[in-house]
Image (cartoon, helix red, strand yellow):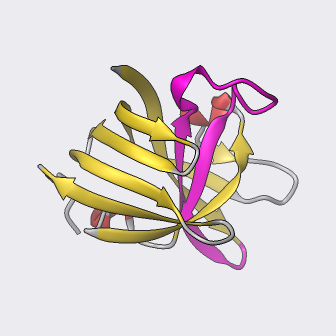
């Protein structure tokens, strides 16, 4: 099974905050984004990571530097703060989603992600959800 690096960032902007979940590209995909991070926007606080079912919005692939990044982004794009990080063990992956065992500092569990209409995705926690973050 493939092990991928993953990170959850809090993205602070002048107009509000959100969270970005980033994941290395599974399965050795080819193309212009193969060496970039799959990225989704999450509108919820980190202590709720993840809920049983969570809506996500797909963003453009981000550079790998965000696996380690904290602080100002530049170009009036706000700041990011690392909230959680770890690995995602790939159980199954295809372009419309898959199953991952998340092993982060503050959350561990098996999740399914699936593509919906437009840029909408859904994450569903399946088992062994063990959040370590509390409010």
Q: Quadrant of the N terminus?
A: top left
93 shown above or below 116: above
Position of residue 25 relative to residue 82, above or below, is above
Q: Residue at x 38, y 36 (%)?
A: 92
Residue 50 is covered by the magenta coloring: no
Give the percent coordinates (x, y) of residue 109.
Answer: 21, 46
For this view, does 8 lie left or right of residue 132?
A: right
Which residue is at the front of the view, 126 or 79? Answer: 126
Q: Quadrant of residue 57?
A: bottom right
Q: Identify which residue, 19 or 16, lies in the foreground.
A: 19
Q: Residue at x 71, y 34 (%)?
A: 63
Specify the segment rendered in magenta.
14-41
Whether residue 66 can be seen here: yes
Residue 78 position, x and y percent, is 72, 59
Q: Nearer the viewer, residue 125 or 76?
A: 125
Query: On the rendered structure, is 69 left or right of 109?
Result: right
Residue at image coords 42%, 55%: 113
Q: Position of residue 75 (x, y in %)?
A: 88, 53
Residue 87 location, quadrant: top left
Residue 90 figure quarter: top left
The answer to whether residue 68 is seen in the rendering is: no
In the rendered structure, the answer to whether residue 41 lies left or right of residue 72 reads left
Residue 48 x/y as whole percent: 29, 67
Q: Quadrant of the C terminus?
A: bottom left
């Amino acid at each position: 099974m493939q092990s991928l690096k993953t990170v959850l960032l809090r993205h602070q902007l002048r107009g509000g905050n959100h969270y970005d979940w980033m994941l290395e590209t599974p399965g050795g995909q080819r193309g212009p984004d193969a060496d970039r991070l799959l990225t989704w926007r999450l509108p919820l606080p980190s202590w709720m990571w993840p809920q049983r079912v969570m809506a996500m919005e797909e963003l453009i692939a981000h550079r790998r530097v965000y696996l380690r990044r904290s602080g100002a982004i530049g170009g009036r794009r706000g700041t990011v703060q690392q909230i959680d990080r770890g690995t995602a063990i790939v159980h199954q992956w295809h372009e419309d989603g898959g199953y991952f065992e998340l092993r982060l500092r503050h959350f561990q569990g098996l999740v399914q992600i699936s593509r919906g209409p437009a840029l909408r995705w859904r994450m569903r926690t399946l088992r062994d959800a063990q959040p370590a973050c509390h409010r």
